Amino acid sequence: MIHYLVYISVAARTLTEEDLFAILKTSTHNNQRDQISGMLLYCGGKFIQVLEGPKERINEVFEKISMDPRHKRIAMLLEGNLTERNFAGWNMGFKSISPEELEQVSGFRDIEQFFRETTIEDKSHPALVFLKLFYQKNNSDHLQMI
């Protein structure tokens, strides 16, 4: 059984591209080692991330994130179990997107507010659906480029 967890948070300070690259590099290495897959979106100073893998490892990672001074207003949106991974191809998929780009793609005005106000607690939660659709689109674009 694969465990998954989706959370949102706000960056405690403005992050540079170098900051984001460092997070991506470290996370990719650690996630590969810990058999974790998932993706992270960064938009207008806000994060939304899905992690999937062994429950103990997911809980450890979320605990570290919860104590990370780069994050504030951390909220777990949902967690559960899957029979197979949704993000199997990505140890750490990552995309930094502007609020304007996100609004054009999804119609969301504020990603944090939208997902915090949604209380559905199953696999149809809009945050998980949103991330899965984003993954499918970007994974297929990546495969077309190869």
Image: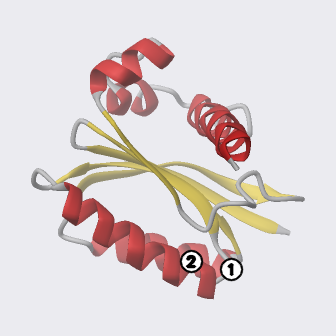
Q: Amino acid at mark 1?
A: Gln
Q: How far across and down, in percent of the image, does residue 26 sit?
A: 40, 79
Outermost bottom residue? 33
In the rendered view, tell whether residue 140 sits above or below residue 89.
Answer: above
Give whichever of 7, 14 is nearer the camera: 14
Q: How far across and down, in percent of the image, does residue 91 sit?
A: 61, 68
Q: Residue at x 60, y 35 (%)?
A: 134
Q: Residue at x 54, y 54 (%)?
A: 39
Residue contact at pointers 1 and 2, CB within 8 angstroms: yes
Q: Secondary structure at mark 2?
A: helix
Residue 78 visible? The answer is yes
Quadrant for residue 38, please give it. Answer: bottom right
Residue 66 visible? The answer is no
* Mark 2 Cα shell of 10 Å, populated few (<14), some (14-19), many (≥20): many
Q: Residue at x 31, y 65 (%)?
A: 21
Q: Secondary structure at mark 1?
A: loop
Quadrant in which the N terminus is drawn: bottom right
Give whichever of 58, 20 is nearer the camera: 20
Give whichever of 122, 13 is nearer the camera: 13
* Mark 1 Cα shell of 10 Å, populated few (<14), some (14-19), many (≥20): some
In the rendered view, tell whether residue 98 sits above or below residue 84.
Answer: above
In the rendered view, tell whether residue 116 sits above or below residue 110.
Answer: below
In the drawing, does residue 40 fall left or right of residue 19? right
In the drawing, does residue 127 fall left or right of residue 115? right
Task: Identify residue for label 1.
Answer: 35
Task: Identify residue for label 2.
Answer: 31
In the drawing, does residue 110 fall left or right of residue 138? left
Q: Amino acid at mark 2?
A: Asn
